[in-house]
Amino acid sequence: MLIMILNIEAVAGIAGRRLGMIVCSCRAVSDRELRMAAEAGRSLREIVRSTGATTDCGCCAESVERIVSSSRPCRAEPCTGCPNAGLAA
Ligand code: FES
């Protein structure tokens, strides 16, 4: 039984590093998945459709929108001192 518990913790640790923090617990969607999709230029609607995030209880909607909007590549001309300068796609 002890070995089983250790294996589960090892798997959870690996999965946690790979997946990030779960934002939508109903659909097990992580912040990392949301950020990667947004950085790839996908819209909130496309991300919701493909991941299922926000489509059950909806409690994660505000967090999902915030993560997606903050992860979109910046298309504006960067201001002096912009922390996102150089991150534009
Ligand atoms: S937590 Fe995302 S739909 Fe319920």
Image (cartoon, rainbow, N blue to C red):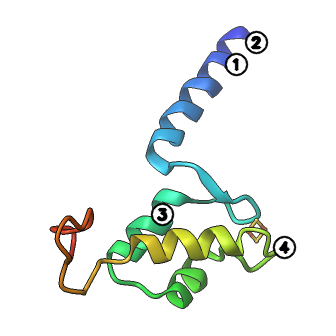
Of callouts 4 and 2, which one flags the residue occurring earlier in the amino acid sequence?
A: 2
Query: What amino acid is labelled 3 in the image?
Result: Glu
Of callouts 4 and 1, which one flags the residue occurring earlier in the amino acid sequence?
A: 1
Q: Which residue is mark 3?
A: 33
Query: What amino acid is labelled 4 in the image?
Result: Cys
Query: What amino acid is labelled 2 in the image?
Result: Met
Q: To which quarter of the image does residue 10 belong?
A: top right
- Where in the figure is residue 89, as x and y percent of width and height? 20, 78
Q: Is mark 4 within 8 Å of ligand 1?
A: yes
Query: What amino acid is labelled 1 in the image?
Result: Ile
CA–CA distance in space, label 4 to label 1? 31 Å
Label 1 or label 3, whichever lies nearer to me, is 3
Mark 2 crowd level (few <14, some 14–19, many ≥20, 10 Å Cα) = few
Of callouts 1 and 3, which one flags the residue occurring earlier in the amino acid sequence?
A: 1
Residue at left offset 60%, top offset 22%: 7
Residue at left offset 56%, top offset 72%: 66
Residue at left offset 51%, top offset 88%: 46
Instruction: Give the numbered dot on residue 5.
Output: 1
Mark 3 crowd level (few <14, some 14–19, many ≥20, 10 Å Cα) = some
Q: Which residue is mark 2?
A: 1
Label 1 or label 2, whichever lies nearer to me, is 1
Is the residue under label 2 in contact with that under label 1 (CB below 8 Å)? yes
CA–CA distance in space, label 2 to label 3? 33 Å
